[in-house]
Structure formats: C-alpha cells, structure tokens
Amino acid sequence: MPSFENITNAIHTWLTTHLSAGWAFFIELVLVGVAAIALFAALGLVLVLMERRVAAWMQIRLGPNRVGPKGMLQSLADTIKLIMKEGLTPEGADKFLFNVAPYVVMIAAMLLLAPIGFARNLQIWDLNIGVLYISAISSISVIGILMAGWASNNKYSLMGAMRSGAQIVSYELSAGLSVLAIVVLTGSLRISDIVQSQETGWWIFKGHLPAIIAFVIFIIAVTAETNRAPFDLAEAESELTAGFHTEYSGMKFALFFLAEYINIFIVCAIGATLFFGGWMPFHIGHWDGFNHVMDYIPSSVWFFGKTFGLIFLIMWFRWTFPRLRVDQLLNLEWKYLLPISMVNLVLVTLVAIKQWHF
Amino acid sequence: MFITNYIKEVWGAVKSLAKGMKLTGYYFTHHKEIITQEYPDNRAELVLPERFRGEVVMKHDEHNEHACTGCTACELACPNGTIKIITKFDISPEGKKKKALDTFIYHLELCTMCNMCIEACPTDAIKMAQNFEHSVYDRRQLTKKLNRPGSKIREGVE
Amino acid sequence: MSASVIIFYCIAACILAAAVLSVTTTRIFRSAIWLLFCLMGVGALYFWMDLQFIAAVQIIVYVGGIVVLIIFSIFLTQQSGKKMPAPPGGRGLYALLATLFGLGLTASLIYQHHFAAVEAPGAFTADVAQVGEQMLSTTEHGYVLPFEVVSVLLLAAMIGCIVIAMKEPVNKKDKPELK
C-alpha cells in the first residue's frame, strides 16, 4: 500500500545516493517548502468552500452552487478575483509595516506546520518541545495583527487590533493550561511521543473526565485565539467594518484570510493530536479483529478525518452562537475558563500520579 | 453557596449552548427544508406570499372601469409624496358638476411600499401587486399613470 | 566556511541591524517592531544552538509577553503616531561615546577570559525534564529558592494590580442605576 512514509523514504534514498549530504538536505528543504505552500493553497480552497457550505446548510440555505459542479470551483473563482484586484495602501499609512504585516501573519502560520505529525512517520520537524514551540510561535501572529491595525491609520483597524490582542493574550493562558493537561498525562512535549502514548486509546477516553474538561476548554480557547465567531469581536463586521484588515484589499487581504483558515486547521490538528491520537487508528481494548480492520485505513486518512471533524465543530460554533461583548469575553476567560482549567490541571496531575488512566 | 451557584451557572450555560447546537445540527442534517429560492431559474413557477408588496396598481374590471373617485385620500396618506392625483369635473346627465379622476400619477422610484395609501382608500380602488422586477434603463419610466386610458369610474361608486 | 557558520553570521547581522534600527528610528511604533525582530533573532540564535527549550521560552516571554505589552502601551498613548524630532547633535555624540565604552569594556572582558574549547559541538543539551528538575531541586545547584521568591514577587505584583484596578463597591441603594 503506498503511504507517505514510503514516498518520503524513496525520495530521501534517491537524493542521498545521487547527491552529497548537504545538497540532498537543501533539496529536501526546498521540497518541504513547496509541499507546505501546496498544502496551504489546497487547504484554503477546501476550507473556504466547506465553511460556506456548512453555513448555508445550517441556515437552511443551499450555498454556492453555480461555479463548477455543485459549486466546487467557487473558491477558485474567488481567488482569481482577489488576484485581479488592486492592492491599495491608504494615505497616511505606515507603508512599510502595512505591507509587512500580512507576511508576518502568514509566516507565523507556516512555521506552525513544522511539528505537526500528518501521518505515520511524516513530520517536518520532530523537535523535543513540539507543544511548547506551537504556543511560542502562535504568539507571533498577534504581532502581525497589531502591526496591521496600527499601520492602517484607521480607527476601526486600531480598535480591532487592540481587541484581538487582548483576546489572544488572555485566551492563550487557558489554551496552554489545557494542553498542559495532556502533557502531564504523557510526560513529554514531543509530538511523536504524545501520539505514541495513545496507541492503546485516545486520551479523551483514557483520561476520564479531566481530559474531557481539558478538551472543552481547549476548543473554546482556540476558537477565541483564531478570532472566530462567537469570539470574532476583533473583526466584528457590524461594529468595526472588518477590524484589523479593514484597509486591506487584493492579495494582501487574501493572505490574512488564508492565514485565518490555516490557523484553524493548525489548532484543530493540534487538538486532534493531543486528544484524539493524531494519526493513531481507533482501537478498542482487546477486540483484535476490529483493531486490525481499523489499521487498514491509512494513517493520513485518520489524521485528516479527525482534524476536519474538529474544524466542522468550530464551524458549527460559528454558525450557532451570537457574538460576545468585550466584558463577557473577558469574564468568560478570567472568571470561568482559567479557574476551571487550573482545578482541572490539579485533577489531571492526580490521575497521572495515581495511574488511574488506562 | 458560591461554589454550587458557580457550578450551576456553568452547567446551565453548557446546556443552553448544547440546545442551540442541536437546532443548527438538525438543520444541517435535514436539507429538505431549504427556504431560499433559486430565483432566476424558477421564474416561471415562482410563488410569492400573498402579503408581498411590489407596486401600487389600480384595479380595473372588464368594462375598463375603476373605483377611484379622485378623493386624494391616498395622496394625503402617502408619507413621501409618491402619489399625485389630478382631478377634473365631469358633467353628469342632470347637468351637475362632479369631481372625478383625471390622472393618477404614481412615482415608483419614491415609493417605500408602506401600504398607507391602500389602507386610506375609502373605495378600495388601489391594491399592492406582486410584481417586483422593476429595473429599467431610464428612471422616467418609473413614473407611472395608473388609470388606464379611456377608463371611467364604475357606476354607483361614491 | 560551513553552512552553519554562514547561517550564524546571517542571524547575527539581522540582530545587529534590527537593534541599530530600533534605536535610530524616529517613530515609536517602528522602534517597538524592530525591537521585536531583534528579540526574535536572539530566539533564532538559540534554535541555531539547538537549545530549543530556551528558544521557545525566549519567544513566549519576549514576543508574546513583553513586546505585546510595549505595543499596547504605545496604542494607549496620545500622539504616539507622530514622528519624534531627532535628538540634538551633542546628545548623539555622548550616546555614541557611551556605546563605544560599553563595547570596549565587553570586548576586553571577553578577550581576557580564556574559553575552553568544547570537545564535541552539539553535545551540549538541555532537556526539558532536566531544566524542570533543576528548577525545583533543593540540592546544591538547585533553584527552588529563587524560583519561589520570584513567584512570591509576581503574586505581590498581581495583587497590587488587582487592588489598583478594583472599582469601589457600588452601593445599590445609593445608586440604583448601574452604568
């Protein structure tokens, strides 16, 4: 059966036999970069279409259904439109920062791809602090948003950026604490170790109630961190037109838009890795026959299936809940999520020390 | 106690959020209840609700007669001067002068479809039609004369 | 010159350029952004040394915490969008002299110290578990006392913030309408 593992191994052996080690490494770097950009483009097209479809069906509508079969090519048409549009820079804007900001956001999103395990033995960089690396790099994208808000020289952008900054800085705490719950159970920050520890069962089942609470807090916190509804008051269109990207148009706007969807994909991939076992197939205790059937499904299918399930959950939130006010947003974080996740961390530690998990 | 209230509050919040998600989840899985219409495609069989207000028209019967007495109640009721009524004086067979409608001018471009004129009309001479495709290339075409040429008031309508 | 050395010089050049730009620009927000790039360069240097934990902490603390704080205070300042006037010439000269003195002092100290060559480069590792144990150990080179003292300091700072930010409890009988 062809798997990603075989393909990457074949490329690696071919390169190392034909070239020196340094050049082989360099070419592999280039290939990884190209693959990452291709993944970004594909994800952007698929996720935008998926969002519009899910939104339509939840609101008893049909959704895009004109361009291509069943509207499949709608997001491609949108991309072409965005490429053709003129990229304006407003007068009085800080031109350098205005033009750099979308790239900062995009590069931060790109760097986050590195430690994610896409399939069995398919990981760009398996560094030993994987989870910590993710929370470190994701804080860079805040800077991009703040830069965009400031450089636009527009009051809506500035207010959107400030709201976004306050929101991301506060929700990072509870997201970090809920990730820490799984780190306590696993005893490692390395993504491959975390995946390997779920061979006998996913943490959401093995970790009892504390793991479920941690998962709920995680999904709420990452929804807030990616600035999505019901926490989208950073770009609240009815109050701030579009928040920090009000002044952006054309391809620079497209980069912000794409980075938003890539960030959703990445946080859902992390959620799937931590709580649902990443690429690990679904196994039940001693049902060997069932487990063998599950093993036949390729690991990349498992990974993308789980990730898209979580993305669907986040989209479901978006099209169900109304937007929070700023004070409600901060109340939710500081009075509910943070205390609950701290108590939950103590519970998880108890579970881990007493070995109550399976 | 504080802790029990806190837990109750969190539980209530989770329950109400789940309720909302259940409803949208139901819509997501039941595609038959689509409420939107694929408009230009289903133009032939398009059915608009009865109360839809497209434009004001004057009712004419088969003898080309209408019920408008030219009382200008609709013109007075209109909040933004959409209707202009020009009256004339008919000479009845007995030789008496009687006020009658000459031209009913209706500015569609000013109309907000508020239905006030229809409610004000004492003889029920005008109504709201369901036609909504109003776009034209020249805005002068939007100023309409509602009584048909040669029409006259129906017998017995005062 | 191996690729690793070239990468080192690239990172170092970026750090230095960002640092110089951060003190010479006349716009306060750009200054903060150049400081950010400088700190991120230091983080990259840690990654280059394969000290991933220290690098991640550098980025979390400085980029996610301190620079965001600086940017927020710039946002909340009046007239922060205006260009600042360039400092008078004399002051620049003194600043240059102070910098050169600092550079000379550091350079002379570095040249006087005899660094022992590392046997095998890359063998220097700092495992996260080791860092954690060292942080909480009570043995000779343990850091449990400074760790606890710092946490007490942070707690005091947090309580102070809450006291400053706390509103006077509103008496409902006096003011029936809450804003």
Image (tube, coloured by chain):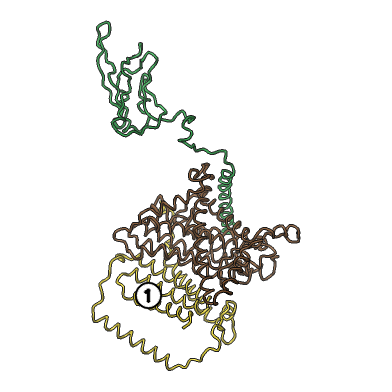
Chain colours: A brown, B green, C yellow
Give percent across and percent down for residue C8: 45, 80
Q: A111 or A320, which is in the foreground?
A: A111
Q: A249 or A203, which is in the foreground?
A: A249
Identify which residue is drawn at 61% across, 68% down: A10
Q: Which residue ends up furthest to the left in the rendered image?
A: C89
Kindly indicate the quadrant of the structure image that contains residue C77.
Answer: bottom left
Q: Is residue B131 above or below residue A94?
A: above
Give percent across and percent down for residue A38: 51, 60
Kindly state the secondary structure of the residue where label 1 is placed: helix
Identify which residue is drawn at 30% across, 82% down: C95
Counting every numbered tag in the picture gives 1
**Mark 1 closeness class: few <14, some 14–19, many ≥20 residues within 10 Å:** many
Q: Is residue C81 above or below residue B15?
A: below
On the image, numbered disc 1 is attached to which residue?
C18
Mark 1: amino acid? Ala
Give percent across and percent down for residue A272: 59, 61
Q: B85 or A67, which is in the foreground?
A: A67
- Which quadrant would the N terminus of chain A be assigned to in this image? bottom right
Q: Is residue A66 visible?
A: yes
